[in-house]
Amino acid sequence: MSMAALFRGCWNFYKRSNKHVELTLVSCRSMASKTPVGFIGLGNMGTPMARNLLKHGYPVIATDVFPESCKEFQDSGAQILDCPAEVADKADRIITMLPSSPNVIEVYTGPNGILKKVKKGTLLIDSSTIDPAVSKEMAVAAEKMGAVFMDAPVSGGVGAASLAKLTFMVGGVEEEFNAAQELLTCMGANVVYCGQVGSGQTGFGSKAAGKDSEHELRTMLV
């Protein structure tokens, strides 16, 4: 066999082997990205948001204080558990969509809260619209447990939630933004990184001042 033929044979074998390795790595990454996602808060906004995660192939583990909301979502294919702590025990990526600051504090730090059973390295994304100070408090509490908390309040109503057309303003560790974005883009058309924890909430602070926050958001996104 000539040296040229031997070289071509070795090169073709290398390309086939390398292609197999690349495909294996892509496959592993794809499988990892579809691990279960926890979702807490199945209200008018939370339910369509969580449904969009299901539509994108993510197994969803959820809970809510209202049994009827859980039953409806369970019929869509989700796994329902009894409390936030149980969700935290089963999922290392959790999204919360809750009505107010006290609800967020209870869900994260209460007797049956997320932080009772959260695993190290868990990504916690709160899409509730709350006081930025509470977001910062939850981030500190999560960090003590080895988890990462990001605030990601939404702009858009129930219709936008159903159509996955929400806008998310995200605050938190920049290195974790891509991981959060992976999930948020399943539920929204725009995902904007604003800075450190609490800055997502600050992006919607004009609501409290009676300003047109939608106009401000459009200006930021142009």
Image (cartoon, rainbow, N blue to C red):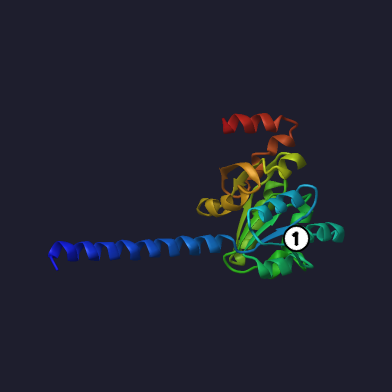
Amino acid at circle 1: Val
Q: Residue at x 64, y 63 (%)?
A: 36
The residue nearer to you, when weighing 18 against 152, is: 18
The spot of residue 61 in percent (x, y) is: 71, 63
Residue 33 lies in quadrant: bottom right
Q: In this view, does 174 lie to the left or right of 99?
A: left
- All told, the count of numbered labels is 1
Residue 96 lies in quadrant: bottom right
Q: Mark 1 points at which residue?
A: 107
The spot of residue 120 in percent (x, y) is: 58, 68
Taking 202 as reference, is 50 above or below it?
A: below
Q: Residue at x 72, y 44 (%)?
A: 161
The secondary element bearing badge 1 is classed as helix
Categorize mark 1 by other alpha carbons within 10 Å: few (<14), some (14-19), many (20+): many
The spot of residue 154 in percent (x, y) is: 69, 43
The residue nearer to you, when weighing 91 against 57, is: 57
Q: In this view, does 196 lie to the left or right of 114?
A: left
Quadrant (top left, top right, bottom left, bottom right) of the C terminus? top right
Quadrant (top left, top right, bottom left, bottom right) of the N terminus? bottom left
The residue nearer to you, when weighing 112 against 218, is: 218
